[in-house]
Image (cartoon, helix red, strand yellow):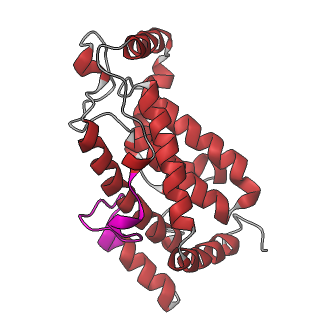
């Protein structure tokens, strides 16, 4: 029989949804983080850097294999903490880890709000909007800078690595691969990915500094320990 806490967490997952992108912040307040204060403006559309980044995207498009393309498309569809399933194995799923799913859905929700503010500040077009000869794996209506997927991958990965320190290196390697898949897809510039890495890392640091967040993570750690995904401290 499930404990009340596990039942509540499971209900939270259903109510929040995976991924959860609400209109309100769940873990932080708006005054606690602003990506615009840590990022410089993206390169201009006609700059030498943008032209070089477009050339690199063309090279990636030429070099990518069908398997790499399909893997990048599949990766883009998972915007939850379970993008790290390759690190943990088959049992790393939302239905088996409701506390974990619920907490990281809240973190992803906050990330989407903070990143939208930054994207709307700079309004950088996607690569294919500047160079229509590119063939991206998908179309997106949002702006390009910073990359939301890269931000999310590093945010969730850094926090998960803090909970499961014995797997931190593998988790961060997976976060980097997840971010790079956006280049394989042709939907982001390299500078978008780098800005996402910086934003996700900074946002993770702010979240981890909050006593309420650390308290929530204690339940996540206990659940992951019980499932055998991390060692007891």
- Residue at position x 29%, y 59% from top? 21
**Residue at image point 54% right, 50% down:** 201
The single residue placed furthest to the left in the displayed view is 141
Q: Is 25 part of what is drawn in magenta?
A: yes
- Is 150 situated above or below 208? above
Q: Is residue 169 left or right of residue 140?
A: right
* Viewer can see residue 115: yes
Instruction: Where is residue 27? Give x, y as percent.
Output: 41, 71
Locate the C terminus by quadrant.
Answer: bottom right
Q: Residue 92, can we see it?
A: no
Q: Quadrant of residue 219?
A: bottom right
Which residues are the magenta region?
14-34
Q: Is residue 3 above or below residue 104?
A: below
Q: Please tell me whether residue 127 is drawn above or below residue 209 in the rendered image.
A: above
- Residue in view at x 52 percent, y 68 percent: 100
28, 131: nearer the viewer = 28
* Image location of residue 222, percent across then percent down: 65, 77
Identify the residue at horizontal 38%, vertical 11% (top origin). 51
Please state the total of marks drawn on the protein image.
Answer: 0
Q: From the top left corner, tell me how far across and down residue 204 is, in percent.
A: 53, 58
Q: Position of residue 216 (x, y in %)?
A: 53, 77
Q: Main secondary structure of the magenta part?
A: loop
- Position of residue 12 relative to residue 2, above or below, is above
Q: Is residue 97 within the magenta segment?
A: no
In terms of depth relative to the viewer, which is nearer, 47 or 144? 47
Q: On the rendered structure, is 138 left or right of 35?
A: left
């Amino acid at each position: 029989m499930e404990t009340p806490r596990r039942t509540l967490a499971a209900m939270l997952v259903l109510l929040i949804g995976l991924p959860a992108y609400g209109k309100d912040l769940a873990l932080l307040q708006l005054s606690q983080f602003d990506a615009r204060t840590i990022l410089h403006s993206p390169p201009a559309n006609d700059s030498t850097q943008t032209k070089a980044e477009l050339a690199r995207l063309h090279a990636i498009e030429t070099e990518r294999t069908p398997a790499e393309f399909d893997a990048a498309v599949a990766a883009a569809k998972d915007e939850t903490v379970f993008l790290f399933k390759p690190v943990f194995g088959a049992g790393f799923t939302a239905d088996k880890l409701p506390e974990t799913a619920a907490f990281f859905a809240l973190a992803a929700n906050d990330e989407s709000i903070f990143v939208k503010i930054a994207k709307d500040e700079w309004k950088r077009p996607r690569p294919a909007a500047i160079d229509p000869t590119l063939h991206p794996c998908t179309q997106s209506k949002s702006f390009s800078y910073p990359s939301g997927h890269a931000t999310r991958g590093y945010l969730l990965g850094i926090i998960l690595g803090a909970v499961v320190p014995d797997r931190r290196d593998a988790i961060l390697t997976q976060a980097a691969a997840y971010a790079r898949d956006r280049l394989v897809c042709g939907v982001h510039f390299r500078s978008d990915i780098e800005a996402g890495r910086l934003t996700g890392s900074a946002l993770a640091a702010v979240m981890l500094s909050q006593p309420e967040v650390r308290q929530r993570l204690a339940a996540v750690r206990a659940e992951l320990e019980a499932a055998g995904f991390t060692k007891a401290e």
